[in-house]
Image (cartoon, rainbow, N blue to C red):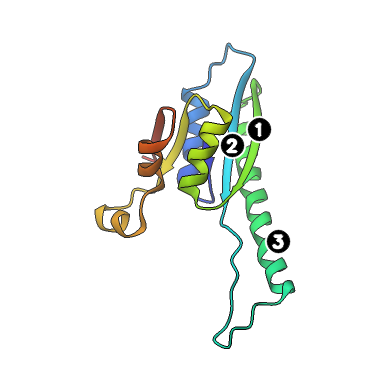
Amino acid sequence: MVAVDESEESMYALSWCISNLISDTKSNNKLVLLYVKPPPAVFSDAAGYIFSTEAIAAMEKYSTELADSVMERAKVIFNNLNATNINIERVIGIGDPKNVICKAVHKLEADTLVMGSHGYGLIKRALLGSVSDHCAKYAKCPVVVVRQP
């Protein structure tokens, strides 16, 4: 399983995974691409009015288009690396990425989880949290965190 998002780091992790972890001789390689959309939010203004259904629909449409764009970028990587011996399963989750990824690993019985690293420093990681750190601790399989050179 490779967790992908909009970042260059996750796309690099995907290409690294294809080049280094997947056997060219096996014909039944399976790779799960997991993209996690943020949960739908309910926004209200100071007067307590909830955004219109049109605004919520527009935000959901954008979120779906973003997920499709990420999967298309992944497809380009597969094509560029001639990864024809890989069966790809695309999974889109909704929620907090660190929790969704760990649950997907367990549910889909992933052998290995591959993730990119944004390379945040200590302070930024402490403030924002690190999805890869969380998954390394709690995922029920080996986790490979790939850092872009």
Element type where label 3 sits in the image: helix
Which sits earlier in the primary sequence, circle 3 or circle 2? 2
For disc 1, the neighbor class at 10 Å (few under 14, some 14 to 19, many from 20) is: few
* Kind of residue sitting beneath label 3: Lys
For disc 2, the neighbor class at 10 Å (few under 14, some 14 to 19, many from 20) is: many
Labels 3 & 2 near each other (Cβ < 8 A) = no
The quadrant where residue 89 appears: top right
Element type where label 1 sits in the image: strand
* Kind of residue sitting beneath label 2: Leu
Disc 1 target residue: 89
Residue at x 54%, y 86% (from the top left corner): 46
Element type where label 2 sits in the image: strand
Which sits earlier in the primary sequence, circle 2 or circle 1? 2
Note whether residue 95 is visible: yes
Rendered position, 56 above or below 61: below
- Residue placed furthest toward the left: 122
C-alpha gap between disc 1 and disc 3: 22 Å
Rendered position, 99 above or below 114: below
Rendered position, 129 above or below 60: above
- Residue placed furthest toward the top: 25
Q: Is residue 83 left or right of residue 20?
A: right
Disc 3 target residue: 61
